[in-house]
Amino acid sequence: MENTDESNPLLPNQQSEVKDEKKPNKPISSTTPVPPFPADPVKPLSAAVPMGWTAEGVPMGHGVVGDPIMNRAQWDSGLCACFGRTDEFCSSDIEVCLLGSVVPCVLYGSNAERLGSAPGTFANHCLPYTGLYLIGQSFFGSNCVAPCFTYPSRTAIRRKFNLEGSCEAFNRSSGCCGSFVEDEVQREQCESICDFATHFFCHPCALCQEGRELRRRLPHPGFNAQQVLVMIPPNEQTMGR
């Protein structure tokens, strides 16, 4: 009877493995070169951090990409630019200036109507403003009561269009109060105080600036009304003889 191991095709491999196991392991001499491990490629900093430059020359890699503080827009016109700019809205800017100087209640109601776009927004803001205006003129001789209740509209415009506030503008021009501006809660409190001060001390100019900003960004709600299709019947036709 033949040995089954001799007919096994894997026998030569098994024998070679046994021979290899019997060979003593030779110690690796110090002169034997050891292949170095492949070093991890060092990635450049630009690949790890998305670099870019803002309009003011500040690298975007130093801050969070998409940070709303870095992407805030400025007001379209300054606070004291009463007549606006010489563009396609020039006539509208003159109208805003006249309304803010003569009938600020109408301009405030118009601004609230564009900002709110709800039915009855104009009357709900214009009439209370008129009452506060009369109270201020009767008891204090000036319009000092209405600005105490109208400054939230400036805050709403600033938040809606992500506009730069007075604190941020002062920090951008002077370079101070950086840590104070970076804190969102403290910055918003400071901006609300600045909105109140702007309305109280420069009320007509604040209303006009807000009116110019809204007219350039939002159409009047009346222009968004759906067109009404009117069907006119044809004229009576008669058969000629």
Image (spheres, rainbow, N blue to C red):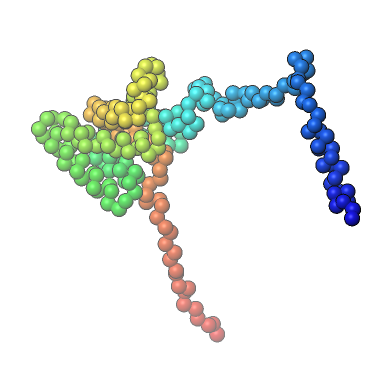
Residue at 35% x, 30% y is 184
The one of 96 and 149 positioned closer to us in this rendering: 149
Where residue 99 appears, as percent x and y from the top left, is: 29, 37
Residue 180: image quadrant is top left
Residue 144: image quadrant is top left
Where residue 158 appears, as percent x and y from the top left, is: 36, 35
Residue at the top extreme?
Answer: 31
Is residue 91 visible in the rendered structure shown here? Answer: no
The one of 120 and 73 positioned closer to us in this rendering: 73
Residue 171: image quadrant is top left
Where residue 179 appears, as percent x and y from the top left, is: 36, 21
Residue at 38% x, 20% y is 178
In the image, residue 178 sits, relative to residue 104, either above or below, namely: above
Residue at 35% x, 44% y is 114
Q: Is residue 30 left or right of residue 239?
A: right
Residue at the left extreme?
Answer: 139
Q: Quadrant of the N terminus?
A: bottom right
The one of 69 and 196 positioned closer to us in this rendering: 69
In the image, residue 241 sits, relative to residue 6, either above or below, namely: below
Residue at the bottom extreme?
Answer: 241
